[in-house]
Image (tube, grey):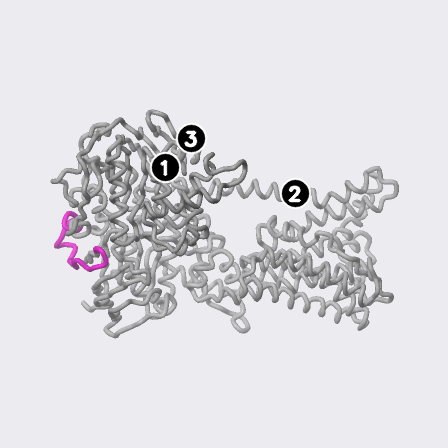
């Protein structure tokens, strides 16, 4: 058993201060399937970027076959026998399977190697197909093959270039169970032939099924590396989500009011038509923060977008004070005192090329008090913006500063100021503190809790379990588009408990009764 | 009148006219195709054709050699497309703006030079111009009907057909061509495999210049023997439509060119019939009506295919 790849004490701090890796160790043995698990934001992708030379580590070393290496990029890495299969395919869809596989390294013939040697191309690919059992038709056009086959093309691309260490980034996210089984068979064939595989995932069932060893990352650190046969799902999930510190936020005694938002059997698809929400029912009352926990990509985004009118539902009802708001325009919904803090402040939340003032007035500029016939009352709007900036502690040179030049925390405060200033009855907050500094997190949390104390209903979606647990009154867990549990956030509720639901290990046996709290 | 039209169809005159009408569209479309496939849509075909048409007739008249004329027309087009590529790729100017600048330049510069060099305002007719030669094939030229098919066409007609073959072989049978097709569709993927995207786009624009240059020189020295201001009259845009309609492949482009060529052919035939009952304005509309219809058909087909594409993966997933 030889060590093929070793990454020692990797640290990575991005220029904007985000720390992605703080001491990662990874040791991969030749001929094994090594699972790299961790939540979103645990530092898995940064680690791989560092390995492939796409990012430079702040400190730490990479050893490959015993000697220190520093790859200059994917091309360089592949020359040394490392290949990566990305979650999002990088294929030219009008080209054939074989054209995609050999792209950039075509077998040539004729004078000056001017022509493609298509015979050899097909032959080479066929021999790879025979060797690894990856069934593919080399002449099929990529556009018309299935997702599973596209993934095989990606794997073949890497194999064709002679990679011996193959990294698969969440390869099963797009596959059907049958395709997953086929993939696993091919991976086993590969490993039997001395190939080494790093398998990045957060699906524990697959980790247990396919891997030899497991490295768990959490918050940019290696928590543990262990043999798969010595562990179990519960232990891994505890290592993945377990946290030490819980930010506590002062909350007043809850005063529940009437039901503000109610979802009844809501179904929705994502942009590609895949069902992302299935039968979601919940009710939120005034004076309550309802947290949505879940591993990202389990329907949180669709849930928020259905309620705010950004996408349509394929079934069910969304009731706001007992009125169905499905099918209403985004503008109509916004005017019903529903605030939306979108998960991506840079594209959805704010206009980066406009000033702070312009971003702040987006919701009010057409109100009568800011208008003089068809014209804007610039002075009044400026005053309004200034007041908002002081109230919400937006730190910038002036209201004329471009939103794009603000730090994450300050930009988020602008978004929150705009949304909350209209005294909403319902606040939909999606990842409200993602990528902002501690100080801003505190003030954003205080603002959300203040609104709850004043009687607003809050739907809080966050990838940070600690945030959900410190703010919410009740917690719903989304797994695979289903609301698998609704839990009261009592003191004896642990992160592990929620983690079991998030990873699909546990499912509430009893029928979830959404209207009780 | 219908009899007159039928007579021209029956004695295959229509084929001769068709070949003449479709050649500039086909050549320009091949040029448009090669750059379009790499993700750089050359809107400037129209302007490039004008520049080439003017240059080649002027040089040919001055030198007395058609070949020198054609070559100089092509070279200047290659240079101009290369400049467009420089603006678009290096200086990041939007390709649509670059293309329109080229069109405006092409129209303006040729009119300006025509008046400065030849003191001509509307058109320039050099006397004893050495035109692109007509290929008469011995024996065949004496066989009735067959001669209309194969003999008596301009050399450029044959070059146009060769261009289709050349383009096909280049795009599908050489690694270079596969790279060209890959960079238009998945530039990031190509880049990660070490394919120099920018450099290939430059080369594609240069090829574009070659074929558009040929198209331009045929307009002034094959179809006609003069340069008329703005004589391309939308041929470059027709060619762009052909590229899309032909589904971005050389065979499709050939078929598209035949369709548009036919529209132009009927326009020509109807116009030459004495006392035609159809107003000439309607006849002149035909190529453009065909363009609109063809693009509508194309859009509907594409939409249907996309719908199918959406259904397929979802079905695979469930």
Front one among B228 and B243: B228
Label 1 vs 3, first from the N-terminus: 3
Q: Nearer the viewer, mark 1 or mark 3?
A: 1
**Viewed as shown, does residue B178 lie left or right of A165?**
right
Residue under label 1, please give it. Answer: A422
Eye-nearest disc, 1 or 2: 1
Which residue is denoted by mark 3 in the rendering? A327
Element assignment for label 3: loop
Dot 1 surroundings within 10 Å: few (below 14), some, or many (20 or more)? some
Q: Is residue A224 left or right of residue B242?
A: left
Instruction: Tell me the distance, in whole angstroms, between the alpha carbons under discs 2 and 3.
Output: 35 Å
Secondary structure state at the residue bearing disc 2: helix
Residue at image mark 2: B292
Quarter of the view holding residue B58: bottom right
Q: Return the chain for callout 2.
A: B
Quarter of the image where the C terminus of chain B is located: top left
Give percent across and percent down for residue A195: 27, 63
Q: Is residue A231 magenta?
A: yes
Residue sitting at the far top: A322
* Rendered image: mark on residue B140: none
Q: Please report the bounds of the magenta region as a residue range.
A: A218-236
Q: Position of residue B183 (x, y in %)?
A: 50, 60
Asked whether the viewer can see residue A24, the reply is no
Is residue B275 shown left or right of residue B196? right
Quadrant position of the N terminus of chain B in the picture: top right
């Amino acid at each position: 058993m030889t060590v093929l790849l070793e990454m020692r004490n990797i640290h990575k701090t991005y220029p904007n201060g985000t720390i992605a890796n703080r001491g990662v160790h990874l040791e991969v043995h030749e001929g094994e399937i090594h699972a790299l698990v961790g939540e979103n934001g645990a530092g898995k992708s940064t680690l791989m970027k560092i390995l492939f030379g796409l990012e430079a580590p702040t400190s730490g070393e990479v050893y490959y076959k015993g000697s220190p290496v520093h790859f200059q990029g994917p091309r360089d890495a592949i020359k040394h026998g490392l290949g990566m299969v990305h979650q999002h395919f990088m294929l030219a869809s009008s080209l054939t399977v074989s054209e995609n596989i050999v792209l950039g390294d075509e077998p040539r013939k004729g004078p000056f190697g001017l022509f493609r040697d298509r015979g050899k191309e097909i032959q080479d690919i066929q021999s790879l197909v025979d060797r690894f059992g990856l069934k593919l038709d080399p002449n099929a056009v990529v556009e018309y093959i299935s997702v599973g086959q596209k993934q095989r093309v990606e794997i073949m691309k890497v194999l064709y270039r002679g990679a011996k260490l193959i990294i698969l980034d969440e390869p099963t996210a797009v596959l059907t169970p049958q395709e997953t089984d086929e993939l696993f068979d091919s991976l086993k064939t590969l490993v039997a032939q001395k190939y080494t595989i790093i398998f990045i995932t957060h699906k524990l069932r697959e980790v247990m099924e396919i891997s030899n060893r497991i490295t768990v990352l959490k918050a940019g650190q290696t928590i543990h590396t262990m043999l798969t046969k010595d562990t179990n799902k519960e232990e891994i999930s505890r290592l993945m989500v377990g946290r030490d510190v819980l930010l506590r936020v002062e909350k007043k005694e809850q005063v529940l009011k009437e039901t503000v938002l109610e979802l009844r059997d809501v179904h929705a698809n994502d942009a590609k038509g895949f069902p992302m929400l299935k039968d979601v029912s919940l009710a939120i009352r005034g004076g309550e923060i309802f947290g949505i926990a879940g591993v990202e990509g389990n329907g949180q985004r669709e849930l928020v977008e259905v309620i705010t009118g950004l996408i349509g539902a394929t079934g069910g009802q969304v009731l706001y004070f007992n009125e169905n708001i499905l099918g209403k325009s985004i503008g109509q919904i916004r005017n019903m005192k529903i605030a939306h803090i979108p998960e991506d402040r840079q594209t959805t939340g704010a206009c980066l090329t406009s000033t702070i003032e312009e971003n702040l007035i987006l919701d009010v500029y057409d109100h009568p008090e800011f208008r003089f016939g068809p014209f804007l009352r610039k002075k009044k709007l400026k005053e309004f913006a200034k007041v908002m900036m002081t109230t919400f502690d937006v730190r910038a040179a002036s209201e004329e500063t471009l939103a794009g030049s603000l730090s994450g925390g300050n930009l988020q405060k602008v978004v929150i100021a705009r949304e909350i200033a209209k005294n909403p009855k319902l606040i939909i907050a999606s990842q409200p503190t993602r990528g902002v500094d501690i100080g801003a997190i505190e003030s954003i949390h205080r603002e959300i809790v203040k609104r709850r104390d004043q009687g607003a209903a809050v739907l809080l979606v966050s990838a940070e379990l600690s945030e959900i647990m410190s703010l919410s009154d009740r917690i719903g867990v989304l797994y695979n588009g289903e609301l698998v549990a609704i839990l009261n956030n009592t003191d004896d509720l642990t992160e592990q408990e929620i983690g079991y639901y998030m990873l699909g290990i546990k499912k509430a046996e009893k029928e979830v009764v959404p209207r009780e709290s | 009148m219908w009899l007159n039209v039928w007579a021209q169809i029956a004695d295959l005159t229509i084929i001769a006219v068709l070949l003449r009408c479709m050649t500039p569209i086909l050549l320009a479309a091949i040029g448009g195709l090669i750059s379009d496939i790499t993700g750089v849509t050359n809107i400037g075909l129209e302007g490039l054709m004008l520049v080439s048409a003017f240059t080649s007739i002027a040089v040919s008249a001055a030198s007395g050699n058609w070949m020198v004329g054609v070559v100089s027309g092509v070279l200047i087009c290659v240079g101009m497309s290369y400049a467009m590529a420089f603006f678009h790729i290096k200086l990041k100017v939007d390709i649509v703006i670059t293309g329109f600048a080229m069109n405006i330049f092409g129209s303006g510069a040729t009119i300006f030079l025509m008046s400065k060099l030849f003191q001509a305002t509307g058109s320039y007719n050099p006397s004893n111009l050495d035109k692109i030669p007509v290929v008469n094939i011995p024996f065949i030229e004496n066989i009735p009907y067959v001669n209309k098919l194969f003999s008596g066409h301009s050399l450029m007609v044959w070059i146009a057909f060769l261009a289709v073959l050349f383009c096909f072989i280049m795009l599908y049978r050489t690694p270079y061509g596969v790279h060209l097709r890959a960079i238009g569709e998945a530039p990031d993927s190509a880049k990660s495999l070490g394919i120099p995207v920018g450099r290939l786009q430059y080369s594609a624009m240069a090829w574009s210049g070659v074929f558009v240059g040929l198209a331009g020189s045929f307009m002034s020295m094959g179809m006609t023997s003069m340069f008329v201001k703005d004589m391309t009259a939308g041929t470059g845009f027709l060619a762009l439509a052909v590229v899309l309609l032909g589904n971005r492949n050389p065979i499709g482009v050939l078929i598209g060119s035949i369709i548009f060529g036919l529209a132009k052919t009927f326009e020509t035939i109807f116009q030459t019939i004495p006392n035609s009952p159809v107003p000439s304005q309607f006849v002149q509309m035909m190529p453009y009506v065909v363009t609109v219809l063809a693009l509508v058909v194309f859009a509907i087909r594409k939409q249907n295919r996309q719908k199918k594409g959406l259904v397929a993966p979802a079905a695979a997933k469930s």
